């Protein structure tokens, strides 16, 4: 495979196969030294069968690399731009944690606040252990829910709507209301179990304290201060998507992004995520300029693979693709992280 490119920031390269047929368009300006990274990305796209990918790399407060790979539409008429929007699945959670921690830092919320008291619900939970759930438990995935021992309600929203006899699409607070009737799987705070529902609840706490929708608080009060605009709430209808959001392959997840907003419902551009990584750790804690650490977070749904990394060298990067391989996506993401780490460090050494 080889590539032919124009010049300038808006350059468009086209990669060709050995037969000379065009394979994958690559948009954005090329950067010397990043060729190995691009080979890693193109190889991973082929492995997943991903039509589209975006990659952004930053060091300190500088965006040093941003390119789009592949086709934004199923008709293959629009190359992917570097700032294309894609679903980020669970990479949503670090942003939600940052929003909660901002309210804590402002003194409007306390990490040890009882979640039930903050939600101010009219219903009494069937499991009294709800009364012992604290805000910090939600942030740390220690709220008492274990989907491996029960079900993940964020993937059961239509069934829950039927059980609640709703005549409209379910909302996040409907899922919370339903789960008040269900038992917890363990005593809050005693162990860790990854929980989409815990982050759904955390979004409702943010809304109660902030007095506005989760997405509005996130965008207007947390992200806007850093000039980050390309983080949006996903929509289930293609007709209402932002024009820069890519299409998704047949069989992509029908995850309800509106109901699952604070757990896995955001769409974003790779440069916007790198900008976020400059200012917040992936734990959601604020990041002081010049501090360094080693963090990774992955997001995955059918039709979505997302990865964000903070390296000890001070480099941050994000990779978004609109595909995943069922049954091997965790191994695929770990493999991509190892190869991307090596390629990024080599490019910026």
Image: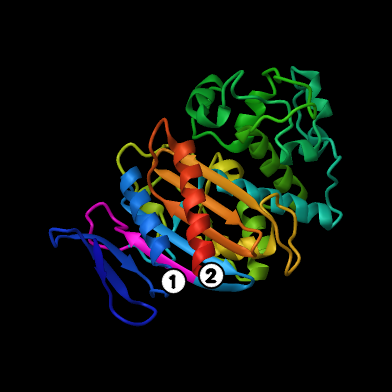
Q: Label for residue 286?
A: none
Upstream in the sequence, badge 2 or badge 1? 1
In the rendered image, residue 341, in percent from the top left (x then y), is placed at: 53, 56
Q: Label for residue 348?
A: 2
Residue at left offset 41%, top offset 54%? 241
Q: Label for residue 33?
A: 1
User: Is 68 in the magenta?
Assistant: yes
In this view, the residue in front, 152 or 213, is 152
Magenta-tinted stretch: 65-79
Residue at left offset 54%, top offset 60%? 317
Does residue 122 appear in this view?
yes
Can you name the residue that lies furthest to the bottom here? 8
Disc 2, SS: helix
18 relative to 28 in the view: left or right: left
Tell me whether the residue at label 2 lies in contact with that at label 1, contact meaning CB atoms closer than 8 angstroms: yes
User: Is 12 in the magenta?
Assistant: no
């Amino acid at each position: 495979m080889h590539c032919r490119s124009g010049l300038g920031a808006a350059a468009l390269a086209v990669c060709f196969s050995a037969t000379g047929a065009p394979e994958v368009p690559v948009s954005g300006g090329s950067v010397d030294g990043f060729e190995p990274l691009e080979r890693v990305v193109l190889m991973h796209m082929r492995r997943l069968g991903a039509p589209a990918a975006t990659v952004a790399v930053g060091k300190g407060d500088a965006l040093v690399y941003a390119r789009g790979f592949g086709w934004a539409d199923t008709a293959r008429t629009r190359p992917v731009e570097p700032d294309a929007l894609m679903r980020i699945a669970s990479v949503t959670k670090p942003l939600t944690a940052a929003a909660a921690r901002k309210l804590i830092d402002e003194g409007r919320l306390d990490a040890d606040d009882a979640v039930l008291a903050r939600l101010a619900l009219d219903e009494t939970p069937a499991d009294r252990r709800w009364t012992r759930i604290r805000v910090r438990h939600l942030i740390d995935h220690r709220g008492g829910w274990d989907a491996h021992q029960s079900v993940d309600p964020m993937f059961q929203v239509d069934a829950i709507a039927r059980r609640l006899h709703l005549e409209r699409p379910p909302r996040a607070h409907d899922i919370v209301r339903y789960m008040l009737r269900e038992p917890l799987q363990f005593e809050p705070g005693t162990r860790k179990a990854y929980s989409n529902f815990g982050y759904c609840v955390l979004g409702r706490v943010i809304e109660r304290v902030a007095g506005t929708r989760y997405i509005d608080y996130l965008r207007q009060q947390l992200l806007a201060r850093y000039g980050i605009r390309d983080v949006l709430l996903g929509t289930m209808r293609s007709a209402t998507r932002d024009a820069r959001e890519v299409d998704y392959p047949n069989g992509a997840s029908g995850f309800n992004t509106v109901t699952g907003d604070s757990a896995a419902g955001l769409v974003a551009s790779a440069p916007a995520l790198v900008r976020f990584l400059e200012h917040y750790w992936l734990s959601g804690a604020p990041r002081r300029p010049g501090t360094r650490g080693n963090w990774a977070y992955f997001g995955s749904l059918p039709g979505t693979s997302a990865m964000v990394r903070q390296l000890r060298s001070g480099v941050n990067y994000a990779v978004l693709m609109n595909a995943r391989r069922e049954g091997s996506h965790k191994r695929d993401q770990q493999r991509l992280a190892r190869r991307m780490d090596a390629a990024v460090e080599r490019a910026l050494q």
